Amino acid sequence: MTVYIIHENDAWLPPFRQAFEALQLPFVEWNLSTTHGYSLTQSPNPDAIYFNRISPSSHTRNHRFSCEITSQVLEYLSLHSCRIINDQRALSLELSKVKQYVELTKSGIRVPRTAFVASATSLNQTETAQAKESFLQTLRETARDNFFDESTQKWIPFVSKHNRAGKGLGVHLFTDDKQLEKQFETLLTTNADAEEFSVDGIYLLQEYIKSPQQVINRAEFIGYKLMYVIEVDTRQGFQLCPSDACRKTADSKLVKQSADEIKHGFDIRSIESLNEREKQLVQQLENFLEQRQIEVAGIEWVDNGTNVYVYDVNCNTNYNVAAETRFFGSMHGTIQLGEYFRKELQKLK
């Protein structure tokens, strides 16, 4: 009885290894950042759980096709009726914020006002001035149509973001269309970092929801049920990945995050601290996940003091061990995950 971890980023696995080894839970790392061969007629291990934790930011680690490969691997596993944790339904949500907002809206869950601009050609490969101007014009018009109040002649603050993202890719805050145009003009006319270009050609424009406390909340779910809520200080930017491996120094070397010096201020909340809006939202999110058979997820929301808005569904979730250690006394998320997998493996017997 084995857990297969389908992934592409070795840097995120140490907490999972540590927890699964402590639980004496057999596991195999299936790294899809390398080359593999498959035979559709060859049956995979039937006495196993296949845990999909592929990341939409895989292309930033030069694993451009890991997500596409994962999709085919999941099809292969489903052909043989394998037990998959976070199957194609999770992957499709992970790879499209537009789809996330559509599905959340269908479930009656409030999301920020969102629009998107799509380019069939990668902007970093667009050479003609006409093509660039066409994109900028569409961008300006879309922003004005959605975030300019004609009655007051004022702009509603908004952000840009990538449709297929992770790590806060492409997220920038704007207060008018001139700032937006300047940002994208610079992007199109300089040797900008490749990560600033959306890998699927889709750029979102979204209403900026301001938290009076300058925090967002991330709810972690296992088996469709809430495990805990972690509050994140947003004052240092939009890169809010909770993994210890995501905390970086200025020279981009990975560093360990200490339990008492948290760059963004990750703090786990007690259930009692949730207000009524948040408690109602948690119930909605549990139903949302169960209806779509997404068993493991981290979902982020922001409360502006009047309403709660969900803006991100992470089906490839990481846990902040430093925050867990302060709250629980030791690592928690990966242990709970391992316990859940053990119960699910027992059902295969």
Image (cartoon, rainbow, N blue to C red):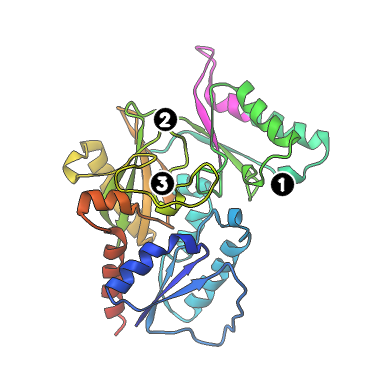
Disc 2 marks which amino acid? Answer: Ile
Q: Is residue 3 visible in the rendered structure shown here?
A: yes
Q: Position of residue 279 (x, y in %)?
A: 23, 43
Query: Which residues, given as a range, are shown in magenta?
Result: 142-161
On residue 209, which mark appears? 2
Q: Is residue 293 in sight in this rendering?
A: no
Whether residue 189 sits left or right of residue 26 in the image: it is: right
| Residue that appears at 19% across and 39% down | 273
Choose the circle earlier in sequence order: 1 or 2: 1
Q: Position of residue 78 (x, y in %)?
A: 48, 75
Q: CA distance from mark 1 to mark 2?
A: 29 Å
- For label 1, the residue is 122
Measuring 54% from the left and 27% from the top, which residue is drawn there? 146
Tell which circle, 3 or 2, labels the residue nearer the N-terminal end: 3
Residue at coordinates 39% horizontally, 49% vertically from top-left? 242
Residue 150 drawn in magenta = yes
